[in-house]
Image (spheres, coloured by chain):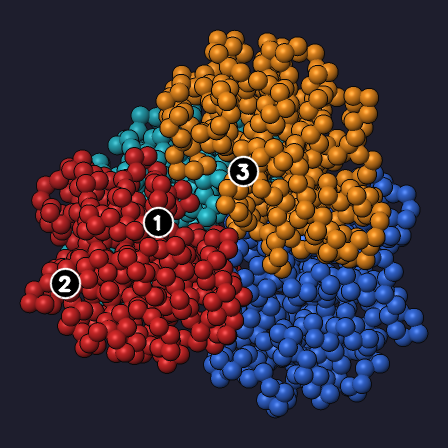
Chain colours: A red, B cyan, C blue, D orange
Amino acid sequence: MKKLRAGILGATGVVGQQFVRILSNHPFFETVVVTGSARSSGKPYKDATDWIVTNNPPENVTDLDVLDTNTKVILRNDIDLVFSSLPSDVAYSIEDELASAGVPVFSNAGAHRMKESVPILIPEINPSHLNLVSSQQYGEGFIVTNSNCSTSGLVFGLKPLMDFGINDVIVTTYQAVSGAGRNGVGSMDILGNVIPYISNEETKIAQETQIILGCKENGKIVPAPFDVNASCARVPVLNGHLESVVVQLEREFSVDQIIEAFNSFSGEPQALDLPTAPSNPIIVCQEPDRPQPTRDLSLQVGDLGMAVKIGRVRKQKDRLNFFLLVHNAIRGAAGASVLNAEFARVKGVIE
Amino acid sequence: MKKLRAGILGATGVVGQQFVRILSNHPFFETVVVTGSARSSGKPYKDATDWIVTNNPPENVTDLDVLDTNTKVILRNDIDLVFSSLPSDVAYSIEDELASAGVPVFSNAGAHRMKESVPILIPEINPSHLNLVSSQQYGEGFIVTNSNCSTSGLVFGLKPLMDFGINDVIVTTYQAVSGAGRNGVGSMDILGNVIPYISNEETKIAQETQIILGCKENGKIVPAPFDVNASCARVPVLNGHLESVVVQLEREFSVDQIIEAFNSFSGEPQALDLPTAPSNPIIVCQEPDRPQPTRDLSLQVGDLGMAVKIGRVRKQKDRLNFFLLVHNAIRGAAGASVLNAEFARVKGVIE
Amino acid sequence: MKKLRAGILGATGVVGQQFVRILSNHPFFETVVVTGSARSSGKPYKDATDWIVTNNPPENVTDLDVLDTNTKVILRNDIDLVFSSLPSDVAYSIEDELASAGVPVFSNAGAHRMKESVPILIPEINPSHLNLVSSQQYGEGFIVTNSNCSTSGLVFGLKPLMDFGINDVIVTTYQAVSGAGRNGVGSMDILGNVIPYISNEETKIAQETQIILGCKENGKIVPAPFDVNASCARVPVLNGHLESVVVQLEREFSVDQIIEAFNSFSGEPQALDLPTAPSNPIIVCQEPDRPQPTRDLSLQVGDLGMAVKIGRVRKQKDRLNFFLLVHNAIRGAAGASVLNAEFARVKGVIE
Amino acid sequence: MKKLRAGILGATGVVGQQFVRILSNHPFFETVVVTGSARSSGKPYKDATDWIVTNNPPENVTDLDVLDTNTKVILRNDIDLVFSSLPSDVAYSIEDELASAGVPVFSNAGAHRMKESVPILIPEINPSHLNLVSSQQYGEGFIVTNSNCSTSGLVFGLKPLMDFGINDVIVTTYQAVSGAGRNGVGSMDILGNVIPYISNEETKIAQETQIILGCKENGKIVPAPFDVNASCARVPVLNGHLESVVVQLEREFSVDQIIEAFNSFSGEPQALDLPTAPSNPIIVCQEPDRPQPTRDLSLQVGDLGMAVKIGRVRKQKDRLNFFLLVHNAIRGAAGASVLNAEFARVKGVIE
């Protein structure tokens, strides 16, 4: 299969670095363009980037010159698709212009997420939403988004429960500092502390969860009808959002049934054996005190952080309780977008 | 008023040190006995104790010899009451023996909490429960407990809501390491991590909350009828349990009404101006990202950590959400017991 | 004594907040002007400031409007002196202009420190350096600086050793994140980590130490002749720089003699009983594992962080080793400048 | 090559777990015996161990029963050698008894390190010291130790400097909590703190460094003649000891010469291509702010933490300064012992 030529928008940030990392030696895509802010542009990637996600940036990008994040500059290059980890304020117009110019955009930015015709795609969960792109106004180009990082974990905890009928959901988060970007959380604010506030996060979780788990009717998404009540806090953890989830189900259930539903859950990325898909999208921890951010982000060989970990599944009166852990920068950001592009390619939406 | 002679059981631990601190220069009580484990006994308090709660132990105890935590040894001394911060396994028999010997016991241990005749007393919340001691079998002695540290915060968040009718409560905690005692949480387990498990904590919160907010009928406590669904986790914070609370209320409410209910809440300790009582038992933070453990444990002059802080009061659909912060070692432990003893003295239960 | 009217330049930052705090209810000075960046100016101080150093900003400044940090704007006000916690790049010209306009400037900024006629004053250590201001070109105005935060601790560890003859000094630091300012160190960089680099810090420590401990000859400072070899690192600590110091002395010494020299050290601020002066400028810890940042920043009643703590004094072969702890934001910044102004007032240099 | 049958003493602790991990799929050795404390013995390894070093213990040991750490019990098994990560107090007699019974012991414990006939072996540094075992009293058995974890980094920083003549060494450490074992450092002591004391560590560093870098004369080690002045502190870091090193050299040097000496350093394990040997025993970081514990413990493919990282090489007056980073649990403990056994096998000392 010929590799498609990919651009990474906002390639020097934390999520951008994860894009670079995941796309090095990728069987479907090769990185040919990396963009950054005015401060970075013109420099070789290795000099423009304060690389933090592994020891060193992969060799295929170290000497790429960072381009200015500007539509005209980007379009001077021969690219088949772009991945976007731009800040939302910048993302809106750039992504719009690139899609208008015929470029498929796989975006981690929230800018276009709330548009009716833009899918918030998680191929294990809502693969049929991909087709929304045909209703976009862009011609050959289009925009596919992935969800907010907290949402990306929560929907894995909920999807297997839908057979039991979900009445309502209450989620409380313990979110890692990397979710706010490289300098999003200052050390004076978070050392030894918890900050019970993340701007807009609670609303995003509620809305995105309802959309992702919604049905497509007449080419439009009807949001899932249950409430999602979210409370979000930042904790002094580097990577990995932990979430406490309380669900009221319509039907009778036992803890064993729920664990079985989690363990047996699988989706199209697994059936298609997509490169970035984990063997098991959900891993249930047996130990009484897991999952934990420092120990469980990657639990299987080959799991780079794409599997969601669940533990402490328990029934309290009529409610189901559990904790889940999602790698916010992988399953919640760069890995999610790459999986979306893999899925789109295998489905023939990009070629 | 003559000061009563107090013993502190388990005086070298974290909660024991807080007892020592709060009782130094106390108008009602003076510390005349401090006990510890076999390893500590026989040494002067200042040598037996790895003092951590302030810079140095107060002068009134530095040279007291630590006694063995043994009923006979303790009873050789002239004491009017004891405060207990013993581990629960040790607490059961010692507290029982002392009460049988006529000594009033104010205990932070969980050992006797679940007994029908033992009050879990928080004088702002359930002052009438103090009278349960008259149904105890001990004669002149008795046992009064305070609640588990997480519960001690939660009930302040719930009590003012009872006028609105509480249907159910979901609470998720971010608990400080000091709640587990001096060596309860190893640094390898918690640095940069969250541990979503605290042994028995979730059950304690549910049961104790229902009892504390229960009614007394025919001399017995009828637990409050609503569910309390708790999920508990340890975070890398030194002091201060943060809790996210979601409540379903029977009656209509506005956020302003709830804030008003919190702000105007006051109890007998305030009316009686007890030495350890905070002016306002609940302080509502205005800022969007508070309360925070490192910044808000003590918000008013004279508040040593006895006021519970509440923030982010909001309405999501029909539910009420807020965060609260409680100083686990003060309002949740030593300060709670001392306030109970102050209340008992003013009420004439001890003299 | 009439209070002098003080301006605080850069009042919204971490050091600026400490100035505000220390000057509330100060017997010599009252804060009448607070300045900030363009983003802050025009707002009341309480709204412009993300207050972090205590619970709430003191009442005397909450409603002061923050002025733009601009010489003309500042000079429209009736002020007797200014305290500066400006960033060095901004500080140079503003401080110069204010001094030229006749205003005494007490600065925590490094901008003018290396000028021959500008004292780096620590009144316990080099009180005679204050007179350098008479050789400045400013007329009635002048500039007095305090040292870099690490240096401010080190010189207390060295001054009492000068009677033994100092041959050379090797210092290695463990520096708190607050030393870099509010957003100086991102949480992704420092959580669970050590960063063995602080820009220019090692050079500053060497140069400033030699100047502060230098002799005044013919109205000029002759730097102390010994080498100061510094290695600096940032650690995940909020406040308090710890330093390991190794000194080679010319004369024979015993550990007891050194401890005695530390304990008996006192200076003019103590003799003059200046408001911000600690009773003992050096406190020697007895415990084998102290001083520690979280436990020892303030060890005596009334010590707001102005005393330097020393521990683990030991002799290894012919070298003297010890650890010292300095509150970087108090003795190393705002408290140092305030003490300098107090000293200048009592000496009649400002009135 | 037939695999030798290995026992791991103290296999459930932090260093024991690293032994288990490094020996899984090892070409020279297979783990057939694991021992633990009385609390662990009799249970399968996976149940007896609170595994923390990776996600899960390797399959080859999960079902091994943990034996009591008792010489007779151990000798009932067919073993060719043992690795010991016992606490020093227990290690002395057990290691002695096993060696007496003919078993080669590769020990991370300090118990026998200071004996004249027991090598503190680091095969890159002092390979000839291995032969000391021939002077031991044990017959076929013997004891080979590796150094203390801090020392293991320091000697790599010093060995390449010996051509320049070392006059003296001053080292200051920033040590990770894992160096103290699983529960060695409580979270209440180290969160947001630095503890400037580690029992006996400074003496160990000085003595062991002199022995390791000493010459063998007439079958005995003559310690290196230069002073090693050490100051040690614990920091809130999980793994990785950082050390600031200041060296006075006899001969002229340039920074480039020193970097060249570090980069070109190599030893017998590299020449012999031993399984656990890193390609480059020393890696010099180019960046101005490295090495850092969270980013640089493993910098090359295949480096499990056996390479020592050095950065910030600089000349201050006549002294050489640099920082080094060593993985305390790998190069400083389990990896060191395994490399010693590999070296001994290739040299024919065990077979």
State how many labels appear: 3
Give the chain of mark 2.
A
Residue at numbered disc 3: D178
Q: CA distance from mark 1 to mark 3?
A: 25 Å
Q: Tell me which residue sits at (82%, 75%) in the image.
A: C116
Q: Nearer the viewer, residue B327 or A202?
A: A202
Q: Amino acid at mark 1?
A: Gly
Instruction: Examine the image and state in which quarter residue A321 appears.
Output: top left
Residue at numbered disc 1: A305
Q: Position of residue C59 (x, y in %)?
A: 51, 72
Q: Nearer the viewer, residue D324 or D184?
A: D324
Q: Quadrant of the N terminus of chain C?
A: bottom right
Mark number displayed over residue D5: none
Q: Secondary structure at mark 3?
A: helix
Instruction: Examine the image and state in which quarter residue B93 appears.
Output: top left
Question: Mark 1 near mark 2, Cβ–Cβ under 8 Å?
Answer: no
Q: Position of residue C204 (x, y in %)?
A: 73, 64
Same-chain status of marks 3 and 2: no
Mark number displayed over residue A223: 2
Q: Tell me which residue sits at (88%, 68%) in the image.
A: C222
User: Does D189 sit left or right of D126 as displayed?
Assistant: left
